[in-house]
Image: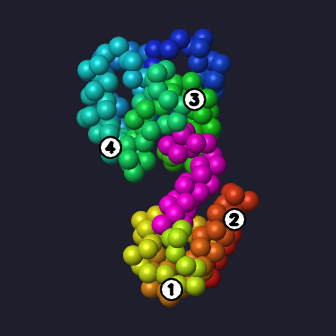
Amino acid sequence: MIYLIDDTPKSQIISFLNLEDYSDILDRRECLSLEDVDYLMNADCILIHTSYHNKSVLNKIRETVCDYGDNVPLVMFSDSDLPEPVFDGDNRTFIETFKKSVMYSMLPGFLQYFRSTGKIELNVLAYGEQWIKREVNVIASKLLSKIMFLNGDDMLDRDDIDAKALMTILNLSQPEIGVTLYDVMEDEQTVKEFRENINAIIDSFNKYGKNVYHWK
């Protein structure tokens, strides 16, 4: 169950979604006591308005129940936040700030995704169902920027590869990509060949929303 803790009037929420349509997966609570918080330990995800009036409840949910997303995925939203969601660094189970109106506009897609897959994917809430395409473009840009000024005919050195970024993009590109991080790091290839492989992955995600390309 996903818990929405927000005292925003239902008359305002209805412009984004009908809560009753998601009653099987979404439980909205306007008010909680400290004693009520413990049952949230079994939640699939918690969405909480950071202006919630009881700061003791807010802090207990963030620090103890969710442990900043390590125990239970957590989203904190507010009217005053910027539209772009801010994750807790590389931790994709904790959104620290998210503008309330944007969060609510993305919520139906997030709930539908959870209903159909049984998985909590905060990237869907943050960026929509095409989040993987966006993720690939951001990561690929990191990889390519690191070798931007290298000669294309030179052999690529391991130190010129952002291994963490490459592992992520390869994982998102499976199974069609057909190689692992180890394979790529051990393979001898020119800077140009590496660029072409990464650009092919970008092109595939932009065209098809997934990778259909095999590493060459």
The residue mark sitting in front, 1 or 2, is: 1
Q: How is the image coloured?
A: rainbow
The residue mark sitting in front, 1 or 3, is: 1
The residue mark sitting in front, 2 or 4, is: 2
Check disc 4: other Cα within 10 Å, few if <14, some if 14-19, many if 20+: some
User: At numbered mark 4, what does the secondary structure look like: helix, strand or loop?
Assistant: loop
Residues at marks 4 and 1, CA–CA distance in whole angstroms = 44 Å
Residues at marks 1 and 2, CA–CA distance in whole angstroms = 25 Å
User: At numbered mark 2, what does the secondary structure look like: helix, strand or loop?
Assistant: helix
| Disc 1: which residue | 155
Q: Could you tell me the amino acid type at mark 1?
A: Met
Q: Could you tell me the amino acid type at mark 2?
A: Ser
Give the image location of residue 155, x and y in percent. 50, 85
Give the image location of residue 40, x and y in percent. 35, 31
Which quadrant would residue 11 be assigned to in this image? top right
User: At numbered mark 1, what does the secondary structure look like: helix, strand or loop?
Assistant: loop
Residue 9 relative to residue 202: left or right: left
Check disc 1: other Cα within 10 Å, few if <14, some if 14-19, many if 20+: some
Q: Which mark is residue 71?
A: 4
Q: Which mark is residue 102?
A: 3
Q: Could you tell me the amino acid type at mark 3?
A: Val
Q: Is residue 110 above or below residue 182?
A: above
User: Along the line of sight, which residue is nearer the eye, 124 or 133?
Assistant: 133
Among the two numbered marks 2 and 3 on one chain, the one whose residue lies closer to the N terminus: 3
Give the quarter of the figure containing the C terminus.
bottom right
Q: Which mark is residue 69?
A: none
Range of residues picked out in magenta:
122-146
| Disc 2: which residue | 204
The residue mark sitting in front, 4 or 3, is: 3
Among the two numbered marks 2 and 4 on one chain, the one whose residue lies closer to the N terminus: 4
